[in-house]
Amino acid sequence: MGIKSLQKNWDEFGRSDPLWAILTRADRRGGQWNVDEFYATGREDVSTLMTRIAGLGIPGSRKKALDFGCGAGRLTQALADHYEEVVGVDIAPSMIELADRHNKKGAACRFLVNPSGDLAVFEDHTFDLIYTHHTLQHMAPRFMLGYLDEFVRTLKPGGVMAFRIPSDAPSTTRGAVLRALPARLHEWIGVVRRAVGSQPRMQMYWIPPQGVRAHLASRGARILLEQPVPGEGSGWDGIQYFATHP
């Protein structure tokens, strides 16, 4: 799935069932999320994030943070309790419209549509924190790695980038088939499945940990912590990485 198709797909999610698309709990599908409850989960997740960052012993400042793949601003607003300014970017205009509509933090949160495969809208060394939750997993590995390059570029020296990537396909029959396919064929099948359906679909991709480590090292970044993340019933187990660079 290319960038334009990815944008179209998630823009449809933003218009049909945005909160469920962001937090896919079975009992919340079809507009069943309570808005206040939804945003409260963001505060819980960010509280956990800040505790883990504190444990890394990185004394970075807390002036500016990036929420990559911000969706409705669930994490963006929560990060504004810890940083002076937070920028949320998302590929889907409908998600950014929703984030603006529910923004209770005023100028402390700024939301931007970013329809490209890079973060060229930001200068080098802009952010003290770059955080992304369930976003990279929905794009092909070449885009995941490209955005990781941009995270390294836009992160301030001594800042922290925290991101999640599935570490393997599920331990199911379908997962075994996917695991055996070349990456390009896997991506093509995903596009076909999207095209024949009447609803937007969530594509899932993974990068083995050794691939993530090697890529970051080649860009001069240093991994501080790898935190296993269970698939919570989906089977897509992953790793939350915390990294920095000089």
Image (cartoon, helix red, strand yellow):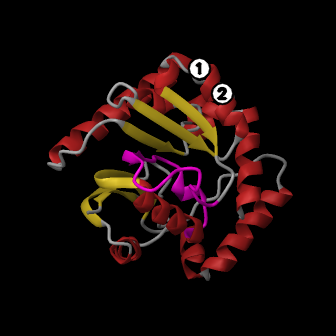
**Few, some or many residues within 10 Å of mark 1 (<14, 14–19, 20+):** some
Q: CA distance from mark 1 to mark 2?
A: 6 Å
Position of 26 with respect to 232 (left or right) is right
Up-down relation of residue 245 to residue 126 (above or below): below
Q: Is residue 193 visible?
A: yes
- Say which quarter of the image contains residue 52: top left
Labelled pair 1, 2 in contact (Cβ < 8 Å)? yes
Could you tell me how many numbered marks the image carries?
2
The magenta segment is: 117-141
Q: Kindly identify the amino acid type of the residue bearing the numbered disc 1.
A: His
Q: Which mark is residue 98?
A: 2
Q: Kindly identify the amino acid type of the residue bearing the numbered disc 2.
A: Leu
Q: Is residue 172 visible?
A: no
**Residue 246: % across, % down:** 26, 63
Is disc 2 placed on a helix, strand or loop? helix
- Dominant secondary structure (helix, strand or loop) of the stretch shown in magenta: loop
Q: Residue at x 30, y 32 (%)?
A: 47
* Figure quadrant of the N terminus: bottom right
Q: Which mark is residue 197?
A: none
Residue bearing the label numbered 1: 102
Q: Residue at x 47, y 70 (%)?
A: 207
Is disc 1 placed on a helix, strand or loop? loop
**Few, some or many residues within 10 Å of mark 2 (<14, 14–19, 20+):** some
Position of 178 with respect to 65 (left or right) is right
